[in-house]
Image: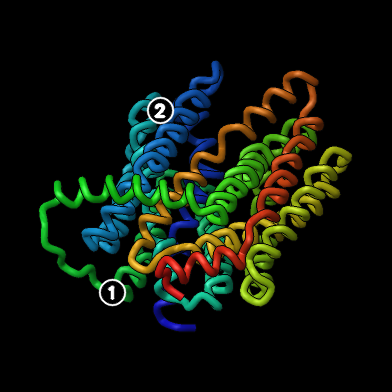
Amino acid sequence: MDKRVLSWCLYDFANSSYSAVIAAVIFPVYYTTVIAGNETGLGDLWWGRAISLSMAVVALTSPFVGSIADLANLRKRLLITYTLLSVLAVSSLSFLQEGMYREGFLLITIANIGMEGALVFYNSYLPLIAPQDRQGRVSGWGFAIGYAGSIISLLLALLLIKQGYINLVWPMTALFFALFSVPLFINTPQDRAVEGSIVGHALRGFRGAVETLKALLKNRPQRRFLLAYLIYEDGVNTVIVFSSIFAATTLKFQTGELITLYLIVQVTALVGAFVMARPIDTMGPKKVIMLSLLLWTTVSVSSYFVYDKGVFFIVACIAGLGLGTVQAASRAFFAQFIPYGKESEYFGVYSLVGKSSASLGPLVFGSLSAMYGSQRPAVVSVAVFFLLGMVVLSLVDTKRASLSVHREGFRP
């Protein structure tokens, strides 16, 4: 594996420690129950506010910051800045004490902005480190190694918790994130100096982002792909958000069982991302996404009929096989649309769509669950997002997109 490719994959290994420990499994529970207290739902309220605000900030700023990064050659510096912002905020979580929910809200908002914002620039290196016929497998390798990072960091965190050192979990996660980010910082080219003031670059970046959005909306293959991505990613995010809640509420999973379930899903997602990395290039990302969405449709419908915990473990494992695959294939598919020199700008738009795709699905899930007094109809409804996404994606003309790429001077 090329040194630049390995360094790029290791960054996914690094930031997955944040995803597993801080965003998904341990800190949300610690914040809502210990820091804020959740007897009246106060913890849920402030945690939801932190995640929503941080995602909104990243979604709204990513196209513009990405454009500035390309025009002013600030990609590497912004990647490092956003990463350090997240690392410092995570390490500061160890200072939180019971009742400091406002301070916790501020720190997790900053940490999430840093983590999610850095992904714009991280993703933008994909077209630069891998030729188009290998971008699928490299994208898959990144996700697979990332899932390994999730597993290892979570196991380290659980070891500290069992020893009674939960306040050491946060600096451990920050160190893990920082340490394995260094190879990417070292092995990517330095930003070239560009003449002009910061204000000038900012104004040009704003105009450039607007022009990029207009160009994407005018280009039919790109427009259809982004619409399909918005729809099916909404379904993916809904499953991620509600899967553990469904397991705990409907199937009565205990905390230990939920952690075991999460770890098993991460392992199967790692396997799926590795196994399907090469087919993304040989079969094409479009076909791989379609197969993954068909798999997830089956999982959503099957979950309606599941009453046994053991069977749900099997269903969750099958879902995990498609989790990394659909994400890796989507990233590789979109990379084909990007003109050389505008990688950050285009992945800023990709981030805007991805971060905006967690709105309708959870609303539908929650509404149906409340309407029927059961989560089973709600879990079936998620399949609609996958099916609609497949329909729209099937209309994306990849040949026409390829012609458009070369006609507009895109990098081959």
Contact (Cβ within 8 Å) of mark 1 with mark 2: no
Q: Secondary structure at mark 1?
A: loop
Indicate the position of residue 267 as horizontal and vertical percent values: 66, 62
Which residue matches tag 1? Answer: 189
> Could you tell me if residue 160 is visible in this image?
no
Name the residue furthest top: 40
Depth order, front residue of 374/223: 223
Residue 282 drawn above or below residue 108 = below
| Residue in view at x 46 percent, y 51 percent | 216
| Residue in view at x 48 percent, y 56 percent | 17
- In the rendered structure, which amino acid carries the disc numbered 2? Glu
Residue 394, image quadrant: bottom right
Indicate the position of residue 336 as horizontal and vertical percent values: 51, 66
Indicate the position of residue 379 as horizontal and vertical percent values: 76, 36
Residue 322 drawn above or below residue 9 = above
> Could you tell me if residue 31 is visible in this image?
yes
Indicate the position of residue 45 as horizontal and vertical percent values: 49, 23
- In the rendered structure, which amino acid carries the disc numbered 1? Pro
Depth order, front residue of 172/261: 261
Residue 265 drawn above or below residue 60 = below
Q: CA distance from mark 1 to mark 2?
A: 44 Å
Residue 268 drawn above or below residue 234 = below
Which of discs 1 and 2 lies nearer the camera? The answer is 1
Q: Is residue 338 left or right of residue 380?
A: left
Depth order, front residue of 217/378: 217
Which residue matches tag 2? Answer: 98
| Residue in view at x 76 percent, y 18 percent | 371
Name the residue furthest front: 407
| Residue in view at x 53 percent, y 69 percent | 403
